[in-house]
Amino acid sequence: MIKETIKYGIEPGTYICNNSYKWPIEINSIKWDLKVKNYFVFEAYKKMIALRLNNQAFTYTTREEIDANVKVTWGSEFAQDDTIIKYETKDSNNEFVIFFVGATQRATLDVDGLYVVLDTSGNVEEGKKLSGSYKSTGGFFTLILSKNPVATTPSKPNTGLVVGLSVGIPLALIASGLTIFLVLRKRKEAIVQ
């Protein structure tokens, strides 16, 4: 079933298909131009993945671990709209506070002494230590904070290693092949004589 997405807030003329395996390439193709158009979303996902990979606080798998280290609070529990969710998690090295702010006109969030890891609204610089309250005049953003500074930049590949392996492996294969060829040729010459 395909539904026109006007009601979902996606551009008119685009469609959502819940089960598209039999649909043509127009439905299943990757729209690479959307990565350019929404590059900030792509970068935010990269930072969140790096945060997840580098912090145990986001890797709990058992009920006991989650109960001991994770807390979820609805906005009405801290004098805000229920369109705001506060997620707190900790590990032995750090504590994180994440605010998911939905459809709300105003939000006042207690952020005193916390460092900004990611702000999808773009209002606060990453790495900055905040004081007091964070006041927002709009919604639809995520604010990830930590007690200690956190690096969310994905590790860059070791270019020297990549180039070395890219050149070195083919050269080693060529050298091995040439050595085998020469040994077999010499052996053949020895048999012929």
Image (tube, rainbow, N blue to C red):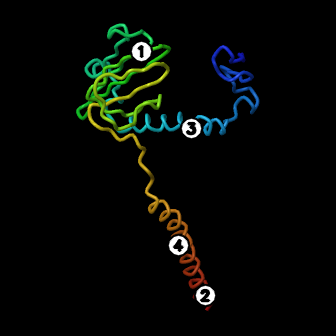
Q: Quickly name the residue at label 3.
A: 39
Assess disc 3: are there few (<14), some (14-19) or many (≥20) residues with their C-alpha within 10 Å of its C-alpha.
Answer: few
Assess disc 2: are there few (<14), some (14-19) or many (≥20) residues with their C-alpha within 10 Å of its C-alpha.
Answer: few
Residues at marks 2 and 3 touching, judged by CB atoms closer than 8 Å: no
- Tell me what residue is drawn at x 45 percent, y 53 percent: 157
Q: Nearer the viewer, mark 1 or mark 4?
A: 1
Q: Quickly name the residue at label 1.
A: 84
Q: Quadrant of residue 106?
A: top left
Say left or right for 27 vs 92.
right
Mark 2 to mark 4: distance in Å? 20 Å
- Which is more toward the observer, 1 or 88? 88
- Which is more toward the observer, 132 or 100? 132
Indicate the secondary structure of the residue bearing disc 3: helix
Mark 4 to mark 3: distance in Å? 45 Å
Amino acid carrying label 2: it is Glu
Q: Earlier in the sequence, mark 1 or mark 4?
A: 1
Q: Quickly name the residue at label 2.
A: 189
Indicate the secondary structure of the residue bearing disc 1: strand
Position of residue 189 relative to residue 61, above or below, is: below
Q: Quickly name the residue at label 4.
A: 176
Amino acid carrying label 4: it is Ser
Q: Quadrant of residue 16?
A: top right
Q: Earlier in the sequence, mark 4 or mark 3?
A: 3
Q: Earlier in the sequence, mark 2 or mark 4?
A: 4
